[in-house]
Amino acid sequence: MTHAQGVLVIACGALAREITALRRANGWDGLDVQCLPPELHNRPERIPEAVRAAIRAARGRYRSTFVAYGDCGTGGLLDRVLAEEGVERIPGAHCYEFFAGGVAFAALADAEPGTFYLTDFLVRHFERLVIAGLGLDRHPELFGAYFGQYRRVVHLAQTPDEALRERARACAERLGLAFEARLTGYGDLGRSLAAVAA
């Protein structure tokens, strides 16, 4: 019989690229990552049970498990599941908060509540997750209903990629909103994973 070893990170698929980059850069070989589909964000009520199923499927195979999800619109249901399963998650309401940092994100939100946030992942998958995901490709008349209360797009950039920044600017133009970019790096995601890996 082998002893459980290593750490499993159950993560939102929207974080796969960033977690892989952090794992490689830091040599966290004892950190395994299992990503759930990013499309779950369109149905956040499904996130808690999907995470629970992943935790239970891995039980006994790892020394510990960590969840790389914010609350992500579950209204506290994810935290309830994690308390029942005895597993911790990264602090924060969503990835925008843990990339920017809690204080910086609060300042952004206070400065302009009508802000639509993009991460590098959302910029790369804007057409699929935002335009097609909200049905705007089929019903462009819904742009006003979805985005009429927004004033700006803020790209919280994980990497200093100028081409990606220009794509983010094009996303803002598509939505008819002002554009701002902030280089956040990996923020609390990096710090939390470093603590888990240690």
Image (spheres, rainbow, N blue to C red):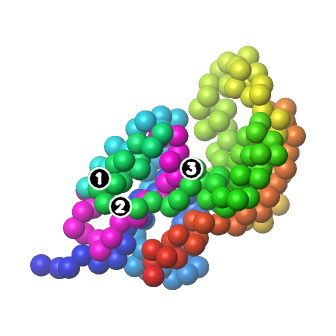
Return the residue at label 2.
87
Mark 2–mark 1 CB contact (< 8 Å): no
Rendered location of residue 189, percent (x, y): 57, 65
| Residue 88 appears in the rendering | yes
Q: Is 65 inside the magenta-drawn segment?
A: yes
Q: Does the magenta stretch include residue 159?
A: no
Q: Answer whether residue 13 is visible to the viewer in this image.
A: no
Q: Which amino acid does label 3 sit on?
A: Ala
Q: Give 178 or 33, whichever is nearer the viewer.
A: 178
Which mark, by number, is residue 93?
A: 3
> What is the x, y in percent for residue 190?
58, 70
Side of 2 where 164 appears, left or right: right
Say which element carries label 3. Answer: loop
Label 3 vs label 1: CA separation? 19 Å
- Callout 1: 10 Å neighbours few (<14), some, many (20+)? few
| Residue closer to the observer: 73 or 174 | 73
- Magenta residues (range): 57-74
Residue at image position (82%, 54%) is 181
Task: Give the class, few, some or many, for how many residues have Cα within 10 Å of label 2's Cα (few <14, many ≥20).
Answer: some
Using the rendered view, name the quadrant where residue 29 is placed: bottom left
Q: What element carries label 1?
A: helix
| Between discs 2 and 3, the one toward the N terminus | 2
Report the number of discs: 3
Q: Disc 2 versus disc 1: distance between alpha carbons? A: 8 Å
Q: Which amino acid, by three-letter code, is at mark 1?
A: Glu
The residue singled out by tag 1 in the image is 84
Q: How far apart are marks 2 and 3 (CA)?
A: 17 Å
Mark nearer the N terminus (3 vs 1): 1
When the figure is inspected, residue 162 is found, relative to residue 116, above or below; the finding is below
Q: In which quarter of the image is the C terminus?
A: bottom left
